[in-house]
Structures are given as structure tokens and as C-alpha cells.
Amino acid sequence: MAWSWSKPLRIAATPIQTLPPKQHVPSNAVVELPKECLKFMRDKSPRRKTVLERLRRNIEMSEVKKDKASLTELFDNAFRLFNNINKTDEPTNTPKVQSDIRKAMNMFEDLTRFVSLVDMFSENETIDEVSTEHLKYLLLPALLGTLITKICGTDDRMHLVKVAEIYFVDFLKRVKAYGLTDINIPEPKSEEENSSTSSDRVKSNAEMITEMVSRRNTKLQRYKEQKELETSLDVLQKSMDNPNIDEETKREYFITLLKLYITQTIEELSSIAAEKPILEHMQKVGHSDTMTSHSLHKFKSSGSKLQPIIITRNELQKKVYGAGYPSLPVLTVQEFYDQRVKEGDWPDASLRNQINSRCLQDLSINDNNENNQEDKEDIQKEEKIEKDDPQLLEQTRAMDEYKDMHRRGWGNRANRS
């Protein structure tokens, strides 16, 4: 629902004939209305319509005065919920945060309808003429636009962005009309206008650099202003908690809050301007993908249908025992070994065991013979040492001299020093 501000209806004061007090009248009695009432009911001039409209407005304003406390309470509750949404550490796409966003939007929309119904604001008044209690209701379109940008889980993001842009632009128009800002408000453009303006003229490098520098300086200045406003707002917020706050401090608080949301709204509009081309491109890509998948589906459906294949038992048997890798073994290991023994490729197991047993016996005999030979050599060597055999002494001395001349570790050291 877009923000709507109806123009106030200016009605001249017209005296109204007062009726006598209401009395108890029987149901079967004949009531005679005063002549003034009958004349007024028969009157079809514009004056009758004006008087009836004035009566309706007086009744509505009386109801407004009665519900003023509840209206302020509704805004305070909605604004408190809005601040909790901005300060929460939970992700925005969680069900709880999305539920709070919907709830706050419903509350702000009810307030918007009420403000539009009673003509709370007028185009021909200044900010000084607006009541202090009514200043906070100027924030409604900015708050609604901020909440809409936080909605997740919907496919039509472009629609949400456009609605948020309408809210932000309308908020800037209202505060500019009251003299709170003097910025140039960009008008929302359609897709055709965006494409035409982007293709009209290609900017040169110098123009692009100048524009980027100007945009950067403007953003830095706006950032400094936002920080100053936030600092001032924190100080005023502490004063708002005081129950004996004066009217001037409360008015300064709401004016500062409006100026802060003006800077935030400008940033939101720049973000929307950067997001819209991306969303338009995604829509085009999605449309082309849909057309491609539709054409592929049409091409596949136009082809010949595949008939089911029935595999019989013989075909399965051919597949198992025939060509291809069999899924079941044809022979056991023992059958395969016996077959190769019959073909003469492998020796018989029984004969092989006999041969192996004989070989082991021979090996044990040879080992015993070698051990006996070594024992005999050791005995002979001991006898020569006891008898001081000259040949053995000469060999021992030669070995000692060789060890003295050739120390351990000498020789080929793999080219190492």
C-alpha cells in the first residue's frame, strides 16, 4: 500500500440548528419533526452536503481526541519493535525477524491510514505550525520503506524495491515541503526509461572520474552529518526518558530524528538505484532460461518414445557366461585348479608335496654336513694356534700390519672429504 496524503478540506463555519433533547417516545406514537429539520432534509443545495461533511469531520475529530492516547501508544510500540529489528543479532531471514517485520508493517500501515483519514498534515503549512506530537508521524513512509527492504523469502524482489522507492521518495518530498532539506529528489523511473537514458550517451573518462569524485565527497559529507546527528540523538534520547521533559527538547528530538532519517533515506535510494539494474538483468536471464528449458522440453517430447526392454532368463544366462564381465563366478577355485592340472599347465598337488618333502630332507642333511665341516675347521685352527704354526703366525702378522696401515673407515668414501 503506497503512502497517501489527502488534502485538508476547508469548510466555513455554518450555524447548525440544535435539536431538542431526546425524550422517551412510545413506538406507536407519531413524531412531528421541527420545520427546520424537514426543510434541511428536503434541501438539495451544496450547502446541505457541506454541513453533512462538516458534521462527519466533527465526529471523526472527536473520536480522534478520544483515541489520541491509544494512537501515540500504537506508534511507540511500533517504533520500539522497529528499533529491536534493527538491533537484533539474528539473521534477517529467520522466521521470528520476518514475523516482527510483518507485525511492525501492519502497525505502521494502520497509522498511515489514520493520518490520511484525518488530514493531519497540509501542504500549505510550515514545520513550525506542525504540532510536536504530530512530528513523529512524518517518519511513517521512511519506516515503511526500510521495513520493506528487509522482507525476505519472496520471488518478486523487484516489486518490493519499487514500493520501497515510492515510500522513500514520498518521505523526502514531505520533509522538503516543510523545509527540512533542499536535496534534489530523484523520481522513480520505469525499466524503459532506465534503458533509454543509459543508452543515450556514453560518458567520457573525464566525466566519469569527475562524477565519481563528486559522489565520493558527497557521501563523506553525508556520513559526517549522520554521525553528528546520531551523537545529538543519543544525548536527546536520554532527555526523552525524563517524564518532566519540556516541549522544546521533545521537538528538537523529533526534528533531529527526521534529519537522521533523511540521510539514511538518501543512502537507501542510492542502494536501490544500484540494485534495480541487477534485478532487471536477473529477470531477463531467468526469462531466457525458462524459454530455453521450454524449447528443450518441447524437443525431447517430440522425439520417439523409448520402449521398455524385457530381459529373459536365456539372455541373462548369456550375459553371465558369455561376453562381458560376468556378474557371477563360473568355476570354483578347486575346479579351476584341477582343470589346469589336467591340461598340464600346473603340476599335480600330491606330487608336488612329495617333491617338497624330499627337498626339505635333503636340505636338512646338507645343513648338518656344513655344520660339521665348520666345526672341523675351528678345531684345526685352535690346534695350529696352540702349536704356533709359522704359516698361521705369518698370516696373522700380515693382517695386523694391514690394519695398522689401513685404518677403519678409509677407502672409498663416496667422494666425501
Image: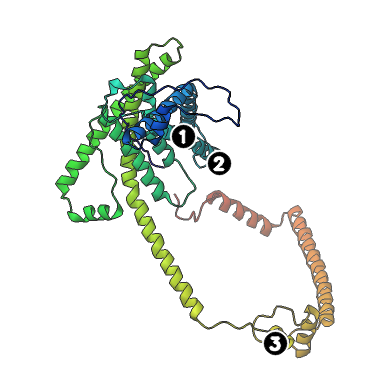
For label 2, the residue is: 95
Residue type at numbered disc 2: Pro
**Residue 253, image x, y percentages:** 36, 19
Sequence-earlier tag: 3 or 1 = 1
**Of the residues shown, which amino acid type is indicated by label 1?**
Asp
Within-10-Å neighbours for mark 1: few <14, some 14–19, many 20+: some
Q: Quadrant of residue 391?
A: bottom right
Colour treatment of the image: rainbow
Task: Decide which of tag 2 and tag 3 comes sooner along the chain.
Answer: 2
Disc 1 + disc 2, Cβ < 8 Å: no
Is there a contact, CB below 8 Å, between mark 3 and mark 1?
Answer: no
Q: Crowding at label 2, few (<14), some or many (≥20) Cα neighbours within 10 Å?
A: few
Q: Which residue is mark 1?
A: 110
Q: Position of residue 369 (x, y in %)?
A: 81, 68
Q: Is residue 98 left or right of residue 226?
A: right
Count of labels in the image: 3
Of 389 and 39, the residue lying toward us: 39
Which residue is disc 3 drawn over? 315
**Earlier sequence position, callout 1 versus callout 2:** 2
* Mark 3 surroundings within 10 Å by alpha-carbon count, few (fewer than 14), some (14 through 19), many (20 or more): few
Measure the alpha-carbon separation of dots 3 and 1: 76 Å
**1 vs 2, front mark:** 1
Q: Which amino acid is tagged 3?
A: Glu
